[in-house]
Amino acid sequence: MKKLLLSSLMAGALAVGANAQDDFNKWSIDVNGGFNKAMAPLTPGYYSPTLNLGHADFGVRYMFNEKFGAKLDYGFGKFQEAEGHPSFETNYYRVNLQGVANLGAMMNFETFSRSLGLLGHFGAGFGQITPKQNTWADEEDQVYNFIAGLTGQVKLSERVALNGDISTIIAGRQTIAFDGASSINAIDPGFYGTNAVSWTGTLGLSFYLGGNDTHADWYVREDKYATKDELESQIGEIKDMLKDSDGDGVPDYLDKEPNTPQGARVDSHGATLDSDGDGIPDHTDECAFVPGPASNNGCPVEDSSDEVDYFKKAINEGYVNVYYAFDSAKPLGYSSSAANYVANFMKRNPGVNVEIKGYADEIGPEDYNMKLSERRAKAVHDLLIEAGIDASRISYKGYGEDTSVDKSSADARQLARRASFEVQ
């Protein structure tokens, strides 16, 4: 019984979290603002500042797992001239769908910090560039673009992270220079192509949504598995819990009487049995299934024929049984003393013969259960022989599955795993 409980509890401890799925939040809202830099095309003589304050973007991000996700974001701002150079002002916006990779998780940042992260992103989209000054003022230049960048992260809480992002945007169909003073179409119809490049650098916040404790950005899958030390501690606690101080086969944490005497017959809760209700515990009652006074060691003061009737009645009402663990033919410690009482009864009544009937629960193939039930009956037969009962007075037989119990009940199946007696 202890081995069965220990194996079950250990399996439960090892499986904690094994079936957990989506135990992290996946959605976030990102809000950022900062600088931009128009690299090219710029008309000769026009320059943009190294850091032009005038860009903002926000987006919605969804992580498929802790390493990969996608986001839809919208960015806008304006380009202006560097100090001391010809003036220009150009508004722009872009909409991009991007793939996201949690580079921090891939590079195991958690081994040195649980609050620093790094995301990579790449995608494509469309946008518009609209100069407000110079030759092409108010001319709307529709473009498509590609974007790539890196986002450093600092976790402020399980709900908010600080972001710092650097991205480059390549416009694949741009015709007007960022300053609005020239256009490639004025020279030769065509597009600037991959020469149309700008940069953005932003600071912002990610707001994490969802009901779990952490977001995919910071989720570490190994955290849900117990370490070796934790497992050893848990197994130690289980072993302590399964100690059986009085040796009655019932672990202390289930034992209502953890100090019963050696050899006492107890029930599944470790409580001392008094099968005949005469106030004398079975282990000191020489007639455990027939009421009698203490002065006669628990046996009735009457002729043996009455005792035989009482014994038969006890059997018919299911009081005398030897029980077994699952798939075992070794009697459980708390029930094997039933065989001793049968042996004592047969010694006092030499004209009585007994058949031992073995049973199994419904789990397993029918032919296997038939053989298992016979081995159980044979084990009790051997106990009676060892107690000094002549083999000619004992027969045994396996009856296979006990179909009288509720198959949906684990407790009922335990009662089915038994050997019972029939007085003949």
Image (cartoon, rainbow, N blue to C red):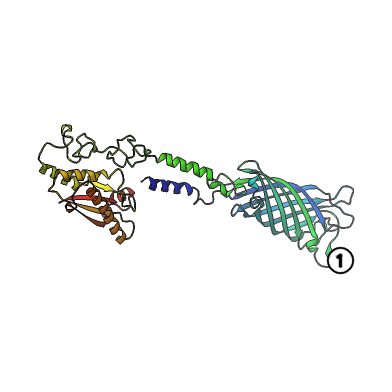
Residue occupying the far top of the picture: 295
Q: Quadrant of residue 44?
A: bottom right
Q: Quadrant of residue 319?
A: top left
Counting from the top left corner in percent of width and height, residue 199 is at 77, 53
Q: Can see residue 395?
A: yes
Q: Quadrant of residue 302?
A: top left
Taking the spot 13% from the left edge, 42% from the top edge, the residue there is 307
Q: Amino acid at mark 1?
A: Ile
Counting from the top left corner in percent of width and height, residue 254 is at 36, 39
* 85 or 169, nearer to the observer: 169
Q: Residues within 10 Å of mark 1 (few under 14, many from 20)?
A: few
Count of numbered badges drawn on the protein: 1
Q: Is residue 121 left or right of residue 10?
A: right
Counting from the top left corner in percent of width and height, residue 393 is at 17, 52
Q: Is residue 241 above or below residue 409?
A: above
Q: Is residue 364 above or below residue 112?
A: below
Helix, strand or loop status at disc 1: loop
Q: Is residue 260 above or below residue 180?
A: above
Counting from the top left corner in percent of width and height, residue 124 is at 70, 59
Residue underneath mark 1? 187
Q: Is residue 79 left or right of residue 370?
A: right
* 363 or 330, nearer to the observer: 330
Q: Can see residue 404?
A: no
* 195 or 228, nearer to the observer: 228
* 316 or 213, nearer to the observer: 316
